[in-house]
């Protein structure tokens, strides 16, 4: 379930509306939860007929479609949408990962094809690309929280009138937190998006880096921006005392 903070984050301009068509309940629940955790809206259909019906309702930025579905297979769903003139971007997510399988999926109308197993970080990046190509919102290059500003292109971080010097990992950590400002960011999200799962989830590497980052962006300023949310993760936000 989304927290109140996470729900407010989904109101941002960069939010995507996604339809997940996946019959494996565990995989489907994981995807819906993961997309919602990063601030997007994700609906779920558990078979091809339901998926086609929901997709027909329109309003989705990207569809994530499994190939092997009950009632109607994924390629049939995509073909029916294309026959109706629906060009919503489709990412096919399938255990069928051979070259011939991928070619068949793309020729059926899929815009991208990602074999299982997959990294959610890669899936998210591919979905974001499809959304941008379809006219979705461009990702900001400058993030601002209170008097803290991060420029992704110049790698410059300034708080107030003071320019801050961050190590590459600290910059990536701050960038991710500011991208999701006002949202609880879990350790799992940080491990997958900042550390790419290179570390055991039980490691304290995240806490160490957050502590170092906090010292650089908050120490000496009149109010803290980086907060630890007990039992949940971290949040960067202006206005919390």
Image (cartoon, rainbow, N blue to C red):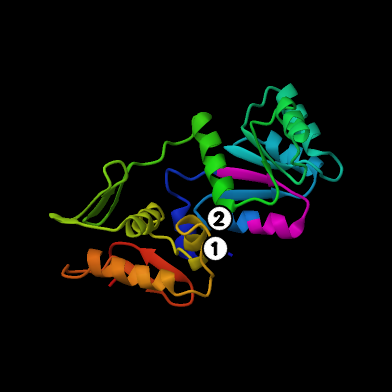
According to the image, label 2 marks what residue? 36
Q: Residues within 10 Å of mark 1 (few under 14, many from 20)?
A: few
CA–CA distance in space, label 2 to label 1: 7 Å
In what quadrant of the picture does the N terminus appear?
A: bottom right
**The quarter of the displayed image where residue 140 is located:** top left
Name the residue located 61 percent from the left edge and 49 percent from the top edge: 42
Of residue 78 and residue 94, the one placed in the foreground of this image is 94
Could you say whether the residue bearing mark 1 is in a helix, strand or loop? Answer: loop
In what quadrant of the picture does the C terminus appear?
A: bottom left
Of residue 113 and residue 31, the one placed in the foreground of this image is 113
According to the image, label 1 marks what residue? 2
Name the residue located 66 percent from the left edge and 26 percent from the top edge: 86
Q: Position of residue 120 (x, y in %)?
A: 59, 52
Residue contact at pointers 2 and 1, CB within 8 angstroms: yes
**The quarter of the displayed image where residue 34 is located:** bottom right
Q: Position of residue 62 (x, y in %)?
A: 60, 38
Segment colored magenta: 17-30
Is 28 placed left or right of 5 in the picture? right
The answer to whether residue 214 is visible is yes
Eyeballing the image, is 40 above or below 108? below
């Amino acid at each position: 379930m989304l927290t109140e903070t996470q729900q407010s984050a989904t109101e941002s301009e960069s939010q995507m509306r996604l339809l997940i068509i996946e019959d494996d309940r565990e995989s489907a629940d994981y995807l819906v939860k993961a997309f919602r955790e990063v601030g997007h809206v994700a609906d779920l259909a558990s078979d091809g007929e339901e998926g086609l019906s929901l997709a027909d309702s329109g309003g989705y930025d990207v569809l994530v479609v499994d190939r092997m579905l009950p009632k109607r297979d994924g390629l049939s769903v995509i073909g029916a949408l294309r026959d109706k003139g629906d060009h919503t971007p489709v990412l096919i997510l399938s255990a069928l990962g051979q070259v011939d399988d991928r070619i068949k999926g793309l020729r059926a109308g899929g815009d991208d094809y990602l074999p299982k197993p997959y990294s959610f970080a890669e899936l998210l990046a591919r979905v974001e690309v499809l959304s941008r190509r379809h006219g979705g919102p461009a990702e900001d290059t400058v993030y601002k929280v209170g008097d803290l500003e991060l420029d992704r292109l110049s790698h410059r971080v300034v708080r107030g009138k003071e320019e801050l010097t961050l190590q590459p990992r600290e910059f990536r950590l701050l960038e991710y937190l500011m991208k999701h400002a006002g949202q609880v960011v879990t350790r799992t999200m940080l491990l997958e998006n900042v550390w790419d799962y290179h570390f055991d989830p039980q490691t304290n590497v995240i806490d160490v880096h957050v502590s170092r980052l906090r010292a650089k962006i908050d120490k000496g300023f009149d109010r803290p921006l980086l907060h630890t949310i007990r039992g949940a993760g971290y949040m960067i936000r202006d206005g919390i005392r």
